């Protein structure tokens, strides 16, 4: 039986290059922000505790929780797909039903 989903090596390579390019960009952005925060804390040591408290508060913000939930939902769905014997059909259905949400990064 021929699989329903065939991976085109050129397209898969392009997708991986895009994925790692975006991951690189995001990591660089986070790195810059972390260094900025550390510089601010060193410049004004009295504000360090306030900055840390604000950072933690923002991690608990509803929008941050929504981000975590969205990624966890996708991780769970993909994990279930890999556990199924008819992976190609399940993956095809998942990809056909997937809709991007949120702003473009």
Image: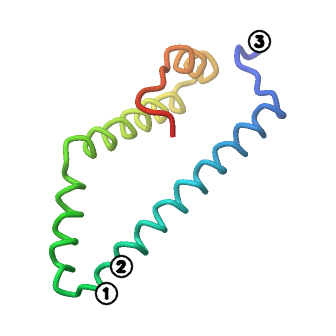
Q: Counting other residues with Cα less than 10 Å from the Cα at mark 2, is it few (<14), some (14-19), or many (20 or more)?
A: some
In contact (CB < 8 Å): disc 3 and disc 1: no
Is residue 28 shown above or below 38?
above
- Residue 98 x %, y %: 49, 20
- The crowd level at tag 1 (other Cα within 10 Å; few <14, some 14-19, many 20+) is few
Question: Residue 97, how many percent across, how many down?
Answer: 50, 15
Q: Residue at x 73, y 45 (%)?
A: 17
| Coordinates of residue 49 in the picture (x, y in percent) | 16, 78
Q: CA distance from mark 3 to mark 1?
A: 64 Å
Whole-Å distance between the Cαs marked 2 and 3? 57 Å
**What secondary structure is found at the residue carrying circle 1?**
helix
Q: Image height check: is 22 above or below 5?
A: below
Tell me what residue is drawn at x 20 percent, y 62 percent: 56
Residue at label 3? Answer: 1
**Badges 2 and 1: C-beta atoms under 8 Å apart?**
yes
Q: Of 36 and 27, which appears nearest the observer?
A: 36
Instruction: Read off the residue under disc 2.
Output: 38
The extreme right residue here reads: 10
Q: What residue is drawn where x is 48% and y is 67%?
A: 31
- Read off the residue under disc 1: 42
- Element at label 3: loop
User: In the depicted view, which residue is nearer to us: 49 or 68?
Assistant: 49
For residue 102, what is the image quadrant?
top left
Closer-to-camera residue (69/2): 69
């Amino acid at each position: 039986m021929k699989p329903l989903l065939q991976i085109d090596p050129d397209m898969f390579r392009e997708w991986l290059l895009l994925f790692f390019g975006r991951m690189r960009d995001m990591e660089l952005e986070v790195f810059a922000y972390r260094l900025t925060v550390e510089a601010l804390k060193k410049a004004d040591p009295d504000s360090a505790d306030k900055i840390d408290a604000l950072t933690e508060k923002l991690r608990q913000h509803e929008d941050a929780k929504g981000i975590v939930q969205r990624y966890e939902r996708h991780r769970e769905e993909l994990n279930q797909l890999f556990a199924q014997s008819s992976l190609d059909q399940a993956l095809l259905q998942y990809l056909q039903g997937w809709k991007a949400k949120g702003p473009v990064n």
